[in-house]
Structures are given as structure tokens and as C-alpha cells.
Amino acid sequence: MVMRGIFLLLAFLVSAAVFFHGQPGFISIDCGIAEGLNYTDNQTQIEYTSDNGFIDTGINQEISSVYTLKSTQRLYQNLRSFPEGIRNCYTLKPVVKGNKYLIRASFMYGNYDGTNKLPVFDVYLGANLWQIMKFPHAHKRIRIEIMVVAYMDIFSVCLINRGWGAPFISVLELRPLNNSLYTTVNESQSLLLYNRFNPGAPNDRDVRYPDDPYDRIWKQWVGPWTPFSTPSIIEIENDFGFEPPTMVMSTAVSPLSANDNLNFSFPMNDTDSGLQFYVYMHFAELQLLDSNQLREFTLSLNGAFLDGPFSPMYQVARTLSSPSPLTGKDNYTIALYKTTNSTLPPILNAFEIHSVKQHLESATNRQDFDSIMNIKATYRVKRNWMGDPCLPKAYSWDGLNCSYDSSYPPTITSLNLSSSGLSGEIAPSLGNLTSIVSLDLSRNNLTGAVPDFLANLSSLTFLNLRSNQFTGSIPSVLLERSHNGLLTLSFGENLELCSSDSCKKKHRHFNIPVIIGVSVVAVLVSFTMMIVCHKFRGRRQGEPAFNASEEDSLFFSRNRRFTYTEIMHMTNNFQRVIGRGGFGTVYHGHMEDGTQVAIKLFSQIHHGTNVFQTEAQLLMRFHHKNLVHFLGYCAEGNNKALILEYIVGGNLANLLSAKGDDTIVLNWDQRLRIAMDVAQGLEYLHTGCKPPIIHRDVKAANILINERLEAKIADFGLSKAFLDEELTHISTDVKGTQGYLDPEYFISNNLNEKSDVYSFGVVLLELITGKTAITRLTNSERITIVKWVTDMIGRGDIRNIVDPRLGGHCDVNSVWKAIEIAIACTPPIAIQRPSMSDVVMELKECLQVDIAPEENRMSMKIEEPEILSSDSMSYPSAR
């Protein structure tokens, strides 16, 4: 008893020394308490603070009194909820880049909102998903913990609204770790805590700070074994990189019988079968053995040899672990077997289970990150700018776009701060955004000179400085780039700002004779240009002249030519109309062998003839399973027709909008596969055709669906080919359909393959939502589907984005992935969109998620979700 008293006194002195030394580097946040109500926890002596200063959004809430009456720990009586916005982030700082940290978040719903509806939401650490949060019961306290290397001087912990209830958080903690600990934690991977056990604990209190200086939580675990302890101080052998605390290592368990094995089983049934785990077992001999005594044992995992023979060292902590990570499965059993030479049974002091979390997303480029954070601070930007600026893609900052290359961190390519209330001079940090292509600072109160460093942004092609209060002259390099067509520069409505030339004119004495001479020359040049333009009117870049004689060229003769009489016979005198368009009518017909065909008869006007020639030439050039097949043509005087394969299912627009009891409602898998078919067809046009082809009118009405629900792209009358493959775009009249039309193409007349990408994004949104490209809000108000979905995401109302006809029978992760792809396809600036090849790759991943085994999928209808975490999991069983 005396020795035990001495031990307790020493433990108290050690704890007191740690406490009075303070908690260096600790960040301990009781989320949802008012500012100024900081307090010290009675059990841990940790000082908890309000979350003011760590986050600017959210609402302070209290859990229901029903749960506070059950003596809930003070940490869980308050929380902060986030009913507004899709992403809300805590910023934890200061931290030291390159150092290791433990971050822990705790949650208890407690029916704080009175709805008794358990939410589901995501928690991200920086750019990477940390945990999907689900709650089995309102009173359940859930803790998640991760050990990670700081890749910047801050950590962002973000809560993502997935549309299944407002996210919330109760406690958020950060603890610095010794960099020698847990060597599997590095810049490319972290360790997620599954559980940490102290089976020999003498009471039901968890061991944590101050007994563990890193505030790891060691949970008691009662089982069929014999606990024992020592009053001595256990030396920690640091070479093994774990430093289990003395309080934990001074207790252990052994089998009930000296001849028994010591077995531990822990379930992994709640985990993804693809996850990998590390198990760390901590040992220390607590008894001073006589010379004739030996404690020696081997270890096995699920019956297979793991390690040994092993003898714990007296009062020295040693750690054993699996030589390689374990793959997630239903259950694991670790057994400790006494060797034949051993006189004593095996023992175990403590063990930990962690899953490996790979960092699949790299953070935004460090220079760009620092720059945009400085811009945010300089101008006090009143936007929901939290977390990583570029990642995840679906949550990138408002007004900001990034480039995403798998081999490099994302960089900021576009920044729109128009009408953001900015004042002062242009921040120097803007000059560090070296990859920026588009910068819009219009309609603010910016003052001072336009700085020279903007001219050093070599990638900048669009700069809008309109409606500010700039003074002086614009840097000559910017003006020169503008004159050379390398930069679109707008600077009007700045009363004291002028270009270099206009500044000189204000002080110039005009020479009348020179002005007259110049005017005469200008008139002559204009007259000459009018003649040239008249001569070549109608000829555009990428549009060679085409005359009627070319109809009978060898190019046409390679495909079957039909007479107009044959067309009349095939259609039974044009009896059945199956479609109408701006350039003619489509009829149903039969060939001599009974093959059903669609015959597109062009109207007898000049415009219709041009469309016929364009479409016929393009159809003859390609053959792909997701493009409608060309069977022949008719070119007889003014009678022009194309003979195409007949697609029995009609078009996608009709299929999605059809109503009635007999209507076929596409399920989620069918919609994804249709999207993949369309994407593959467009990818072929862009990359498989030489020269590449731009469809220019991708829309649901031009996507035909056959009896196997396979999609084929049709109607190439507006398509364009890049006759010069070195061109980045074609300047051409704007053609297309409202709602699907690329905004940049509409403004600039510059057409490229990214215009098809935008239109495809709209079609994908139609497949997801069941709505049309232009959606009616009221009898008089309409909105584009892109704007509607963006607004819904902004309000966090993701659940109602999905077509209600699906009835919730779709995988939530697959749906969310599809929404991300569609949003990535539809930014207003073409350079920010992916290629169709990238889209095809992303859709393949989306399909893989959708076809995952049923037990690994989460339905849109969530009743009683469960989660793997240190508090919500079932305790391991012992045998």
C-alpha cells in the first residue's frame, strides 16, 4: 500500500508539472459556447475556448434538455450547426508546416433542432475527405481522430452539407505530436483512429491528458482475463516511436488460466473492404522475474504466424506491429501463445488500431494559397471563402476557378471579384497568381495606379478594371498585349485613368494638315477594305467555299446515293413524320431489305442546302457506336436528304419529360450509362477524328436512345471541323440552342471543343434532375438548369436536386460524383472546363461507385445510418 501511495504521489506530481507548465500547442474548442465563457475541464484540466475566432459562420445551439438531464459531459451540451452554405470550415492555427499533429472532432446530435432527424454530412480535412458522419442515435457521442503531417501553417476542418440535414460539431481539438511518433504518418498518408485500448485499466475512466501528454484517449476494455498492475514507473523506450503513457503501461492483462492463450477479436464489418489497417501492441513486463521464470510467447493473426517468440522487458515499453498493413475484412483475431519454454502466461498492456488514409488530393499550390489568403485578409472579402480554395472541385471558392492536373497541385486560373466592395490599391498578392488567365476587379472602389506587376502575369488573357477609381496611365506592356490581341482589357468608367496614348493627347498641340492627310488615307483604306470584304463575303475561317458541283465528287460517291423517287417509295410518300427541325423534316422509312431508316429531308432553301452539305460530309467521315450511322444520301436538284439508321426509342428529351402510367422512367444506372455513351461519342469527335469535329448543338433532343437504352448522338448540321489542327478555336456565327449554349462562345464567337463540354454538362444535369435546360420557376420566370443547380447547392439543398422519379433508389456517392462532373463542365470560361477525355474517365469512376456491391453502397433513403468511429463502434470481443 505504501508503494502504491508513493506511485500515486509521483503520478500526481508528474501530472501537476505538465499542467502547470501549460498545454503548449493545444487548441481545444468547445463549439457553440459564447465568447468569453472559456473554462477548464474538471477531469483533464484542459482549458476549452469558444470557437469564435476559428470560424465566422454557423449558429450556436444547445442540445435538448432531455439529454442534458442525463448528466452529459459539459463538452457536449453545446454545439455549432451550419444550416446555411454547403461548406463551412474551421481554421486551426498556428501550426508548424511539416510537423505531426493529432486532430480530433466530437459530435452529439442531442435533438438540438427539435426535429429528431439524424443528419448525414461529410467532414473534410483540407482537400481530403476525413469521415462521412452518420448517427445511430440522438444521444450517441461520436469521436473521430486523425494523425497527420501539416502541409501548411494552418489546418482547415470543413463540414459539408450533402442535403441530408445541417452539419454540426460539438468539440474540435488539435494536439502537437513528437515527429518521431507513428512513422507511417507522412505527407502522403495519415492514420485514422479505429480505437485505442487499455485493457488492464483498474477503473472505467479513460486515460488521456495529463497522463498522456499528447492527449491520446486510451479506453478501458473489460474482458475474460486477469488484470494486474505495478506501482513502479515504466520507462518509455523512445526508439520505437509510440511513447505509450506510464499510466497505461503500468497495467496489463493475462489469461484467466496460466496455460491459456490470450485472445483478442475486433470487428471490421463497418469498414470498406479496401481499407488498410495497422495494429500496434504495447508490452512491458510488470513483474521482476526470478531466474527460473520466463515469460515468452508468439503472436498470430487469424491463425497465421505474426511475430515471436517475444519476451517483454521489465519496466520498459516495447511495441510490436504487423509488418505490413492489414486489409479490411469482417473480423480479426490476435492470439498470444505461451511457448513450451515459458513458465508464465502471455501478457498485453495496450494496443491501438488505425486505418491508413491516403491523401488523394494535393492542396492548392502553396504560392497561390498564400496569395489568395492575403487577398482575402487585405480586402476582408465578404464571401464564404473557407477551406482549400480549389479543392474539392465541387466546393471551390465562389468567384474562383482552378486548373487541375494530376501531376501538379491545383493552381488558380480565374478570379472574379467584381462588385465585391473592394477598396484601396490593387493588392501585390494578385501579382503572385502566376497561372491566372482571367481577373475581374470591376465595379469596386479600387484606387491608385494600375500596377506594373499585372504585366508580369504571362498567362493573363482577360483583365477587367472597369468602374473603379484608378488614376494615372495603364502600363504600356498591358496596352501592347491588348493591341496585339493577346489580352482582353477593359478599363472604362475610371475618370482619372487613361491609356498612354490618350494621356499624351491631353497635352498635344494638334497639327491640322497632318490630321487631314491621315483622314484621307483612312478613307482610302476603308474604301479598299469594303471592296475586299464584298468580294469575300460569306467566307469564314474554317469554312471553305462549297458549290453544287461538289455534290457529285468522289467524296460523295463513296456512300450509296438514292434517287428522290426511291426516297418517296421508302417513306410511302412521306407518310410518317418522326421529327421536325429548323432545316427540314425527318420521316420514317424502310429500305428494300426491310431495314428501318430515318430520312432527313432538307427544306428547299439555301440555308437548308448548306446544312445538308455540312452534315453529309461529316457523317461520311466517322463511324462510332455512339454516333448515329449514315446509310446514304439523296442529292437531286433541290431535293436533299440523308438516310440514317432508325433509332426506335426516340430522343432523350422526350424520354426524360414523358409522363403517364406507361412511361419508362430511367433508373440511375441507365442514366449514368447514357451519359457515358454521349461522352464517348463526343470524345471520339474531339480526339478520334482528324481533323477534330465540334458538334455545336449537343442537347437532349439530339441524343437518340435505342431499344437497349444505348445513346447515339445525332444532327450534325451545325457541326464544325478544325481544318487546321493547330487552331485553338474557330471564329464563327453563334449557333446552338438556348440553355445549352456555351456562354463564352456566345460572347466571343470563338468556338472550340470546350463548347461541346459545356453542352454535355447541361445534358448531364438534365439526366440527374429530370428538368429541362431552361427550367420554369413560375409562369413568367425561367432559369437555366446550371443556375438552378448552383443555387440549390449554395443553399445546401442537394437532396432536392435529384429527379424525384428515382424515388431515392440511387447511390448517394455516385449521384454526388455526377453532380461534381456536371458542375466542372459548366463554368462560363472555357479554359476552366475539362476535356471530354477527362469527363469519360470521371464517369467511369462514377459508374464503378454505382455498381459497387450493395453492402458497400449508401442509398439516398437513409433511416438508421451507422458510422465507424472510436465511440460509435462495437467494442472488440475477447475470447
Image: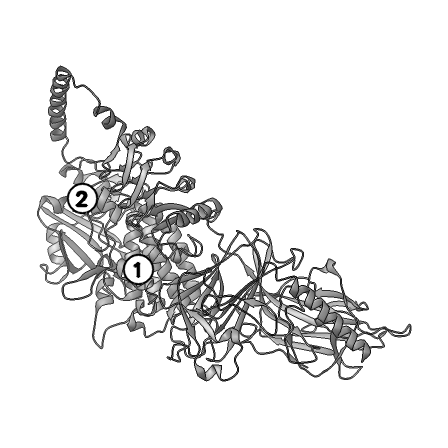
- Residue type pointed to by label 2: Gln
Position above or below: 697 against 305:
above
Q: Secondary structure at mark 1?
A: helix
Residue found at the far right of this picture: 291
Residue found at the far top of this picture: 513
For the point 71% across and 75% down, the residue is 335
Q: CA distance from mark 1 to mark 2?
A: 39 Å
Q: Quadrant of residue 483?
A: top left
Residue 475 falls left or right of residue 878: left
Position above or below: 873 against 500:
below
- Colouring of the image: one colour
Q: Position of residue 586 (x, y in %)?
A: 15, 57
Q: Quadrant of residue 3?
A: bottom right
Where is mark 2, residue-wise?
613
Q: Position of residue 371 (x, y in %)?
A: 44, 45
Q: Which mark is residue 676?
A: none
Residue 592, visible in the rendered structure: no
Q: In the depicted view, which residue is nearer to us: 278 or 497?
A: 497
Q: In the depicted view, which residue is nearer to us: 723 or 119?
A: 119
Residue 336 falls left or right of residue 401: right
Q: Earlier in the sequence, mark 1 or mark 2?
A: 2
Q: In the depicted view, which residue is nearer to us: 613 or 863?
A: 863
Residue 582 falls left or right of residue 382: left
Q: Position of residue 560 (x, y in %)?
A: 21, 48
Q: In the depicted view, which residue is nearer to us: 13 or 728?
A: 13
Q: Secondary structure at mark 2?
A: helix
Q: How many neighbours does mark 1 have within 10 angstroms: few (below 14), some (14-19), or many (20 or more)?
A: some
Q: Position of residue 56 (x, y in %)?
A: 41, 60
Residue 135, visible in the rendered structure: yes
Where is mark 1, residue-wise?
790
Q: Which of pointers 1 and 2 indicates the residue nearer the eye?
A: 1
- Residue type pointed to by label 1: Thr
